[in-house]
Amino acid sequence: MAFALLQPPLRRDHCRASLLRLLRKRPVAGRYANTRTFGNRASSTAANKINAGGGSSSSSSSESKSMNASQCEVNKFSSFASSWWDSRNNPLVGMNPIRVKFIRDVVQEFQFSNKANQHAMQLPLHNKQVLDIGCGGGLLTESLSRLGATRVFGLDASSKVVEVAKSHSFHNSSRMASIGNITNVENADINQSGLTNISYVGGVTVEEFATTWQLESQPNVPHNELFDVITALEVVEHVPNPSSLLHAATSLLKPNGILFVSTINRTIKSYGMAIVAAEYITGKVPLGTHDWNHFFSPKEIESMICKDSNSMRQVSVSGMVLKPPFVNMQWYLSPEDTDINWIGAYQKQH
Amino acid sequence: MSATLQRHTTRQLTRAKTTLKCTSLNSTFASRCNSTSVSNEHYNVVVAGGGAVGSVLARLLLDDNVGGSNNRRPIKIALLEQRPSPPSLNNITSKTDSFPNPRAYALSPTSLSYLGPSVLQSLVKSNRCGIYDSMQIWEHDGPAQLHFVGDDLEEAINDGRLVNLNTYLDRNKDRTKPWLGAVVEDASLVSAIWDELRTDERIDLLDNIQIKSIESPSYDQMGKIEPPPHVNITCCRHDETVALSADLLVAADGANSFVRKCVGNFPMVTRSYGRKAVTCTVEIDTSKGNWGMAQTAFQRFLPHGPIALLPVWNSGDQTDDRIYANVVWSTTPSEADHLLSLSPSEFVSTLNHYLCQGPNVNPSLLPNSVSSNTSILTKVAKEIDSLLRTANTALTIGTWTEAPSRNFFRMPPRSVGVVSPILGFDLTLSHVSSSSVNGNRRGGYTSPRVALVGDAAHTMHPMAGQGLNLGMGDVNVLSNLVKEAIDSGMDVGGTDLFLDRFNDDRMLTGWGTVGGVHSLHEIFGQSGSVPISVTNPQSQGQIESVGGIQGLIGYSRSMGMNIVNGIGPVRRALAEVAAGAVPRGLP
């Protein structure tokens, strides 16, 4: 399982070719000049890694440079990589529709002044720059891209899962390209299902990303390069220093930008459901995925984000509850029941 | 009308232009002409089959639940129909010499709501609905009857568990009772929906098209890092090959679904009922003033199956004095063939004879051979038998007095003539089945990037009128899942998520309905009397009892019907199930 991604040579070449093609497809407009630099840097690291044979030693050595990422957590998620898009094995696939619904609703309510705006309904992320922290295999990243985002960055401390994400969205976009639906990305509005506007960055923490990003962004265009929407879903319970992650994330927000955070609450109920039931009884979540002590309540996250910067404000919190009889992974949003899984939105003030 | 015409000509012109010079067209026209003549188009959903189920699915997929044309969901679908596209509803209704087509469905209020306000309004206004707010079901060899009225659904409507169709229509004051359902002809239904579909540019209506081959992903390609390839459909249209691809292909092409056979991952459980249905449209005798009957559905159970008399064409302003009804008579194949061989006048008199009979006393629970015996034991048994039968009759009379809206047995109106061809069709039970391989499902309602809906997935006995209603349930669930996927920016067929949810929901409901209807068929097939034969009119007259276990089952059924009819909450619960209401206690 852990080395499921170490593919035979043929597949590796294929993978590399796909990466290179993806790179070539990037928009090279001046607005994205520094974006490109960053993307190239990260991708070439990944490509080198593949060239080197993709051995576990080389990948872990590069990953261990990360400051705010626990090595054992990174390895854990790397081992989930091959089944990331399997809805029968990864509960996050079933959770994705309601996470997106929450994001849509909040963005529509707090970032659109005109509710009747055409794009608000069709493509709620139209004209928005999005950063997905802890993108994993790209479940949410691809969704955000399809909802009209101008550009989505997918960031993950594990470079292995990012390879999965890249490969998945590469196949999606190449298929759409072969049909001819995305020949003209600029004008493709409604029917654009291609995913060429995603950039994945693997083996990098948010802190590193933020530092590089701000170094490279130019002072005369202060807000253009920052993000309208940043998502850190199911991430804070897996990092050693969540507060530092959240701070780095808020530093990348535009004024009016919204940070979405989801995690699991630290309650008796969550111990019973998210750990005992999900991991030990039903096996829906791999054993040892979660540590109850690293869960956070909405209050704790709010204080981490809003305490020492007055610019941040919590705008919405909702529980994510699994519908009985729990087998078909159907979730719904419940503003009252934040006892187990919950998601919150935090907006940067002017 | 003129708009439709203009639109039609524009499309014709566009197609002509394309062949000459495609590059000169602007992008809007290019995308339209691509859809009608050029291949390699990709869709979110391709629906195979533009009949009742397929077109309602397309309509629901385009139904955004939000007002205003600016708020349209970005979805792209294609509807493939083998036949030429149906005429508009106006063309059908403008013919004055027509009669109701016997190819018709009884739709529950919930299914009617899936047609949407505008389709329902146009059907009602053009007098193409057969509304019934009362339903009477009775047996040939017992006193019991079931009598449902629209008021039985009042509670569910007030609780918000059942749609209130009055909100869809600006209804006449005198017809505000809730409907139990409506009978709609297939042709009118499909035309009315296509009329609405033609106004939406997000759908490509491809008529005269034959699917030649389907290339769908294998089970092994699901849940992998590389997403499963799209389903590719190769078709033939006007002697041209058209290649389409889709996130999801939906088979709505009927009981002999070509898509189901072509994809080949769908094992079916089939069982013949050994029954055949005969259907036609009859004209009702109005000389004795049967106006009140025009909104009642009648169903009389004979041992080989029921005869149903369903109202049609009663939703308009009744300028015509003639009343029509749809007859569905299920019986054994030999009797059905006999009925089909009759002349129209013979058919009408046979129909009137078997349908227009009131309730009866239960046949004796003792076989005829016992009655000649004169021992004390036999006399006691006979007394008990008579007591039981009297008790059931008394129970029947007791249930009649409960509410003024549901009073005595009503004799169905007599028919005066057959106005349509008499059609026959075989009845079979079928339902998709699934198995498990290494804990992964094979078969069922879905396979990778393919889903079955309607008759392609299940067929059943028409006695409870649930066949199309179950199909409507399929398309409602599926359309909601597709819309959820699109709103979440996900590929509906790219993971097992949405298809598994669809399958889980429909397997439960589908087997429940098919099994329930089959049980009804079995229970009503048991009779305490010797079955009367349609083919031999001389055998009528005295009911001959067979007694024994069959007699007991017949008696219990009769008693059961009385109990259901007499106990309000039980009867209302049954009416709600038939209407498609959400069960009490569910969110």
Image (cartoon, coloured by chain):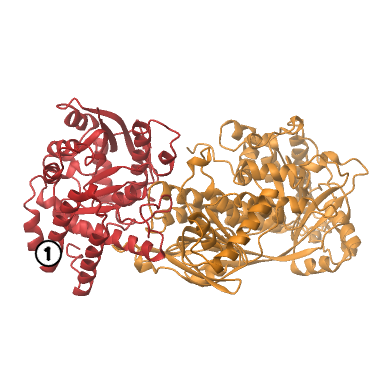
Answer left or right for A321 relative to B272.
left
Query: At 79% across and 66% down in the image, what residue appears?
Result: B335
Name the residue nearer the viewer: A271 or A314.
A314
Q: Quadrant of residue B307?
A: bottom right
Name, please, the residue furthest toward the right. B287
Identify residue type, mark 1: Asn
Q: Quadrant of residue A180?
A: bottom left
Name, please, the residue furthest toward the top. A310
Name the residue nearer the viewer: A327 or B321.
B321
Answer left or right for A234 relative to B74.
left
Q: Colour of chain A?
A: red
Residue A336 in the image, given as x and y percentages of width and height: 34, 30
Residue tagged 1: A48
Answer left or right for B238 relative to A69.
right
Tell me, yes or no, if residue A267 can be seen here: no
Q: Quadrant of residue A80?
A: bottom left
Q: Is residue A338 above or below residue A65?
A: above
Q: Is residue A55 above or below residue B154?
A: below
Query: At 52% across and 50% down in the image, what residue appears?
Result: B61
Number of numbered discs: 1
Residue B249 in the image, given as x and y percentages of width and height: 49, 62
Q: Disc 1 on helix, strand or loop?
A: helix
Tell me, yes or no, if residue B403 can be seen here: yes
Residue B464 in the image, given as x and y percentages of width and height: 67, 52
Q: Colour of chain B?
A: orange
Question: Neighbour class for label 1 at 10 Å: few (<14), some, many (≥20)?
Answer: few
Circle 1 marks a residue in which chain? A
Residue A78 in the image, given as x and y percentages of width and height: 18, 57
Query: At 65% across and 65% down in the image, what residue appears?
Result: B83
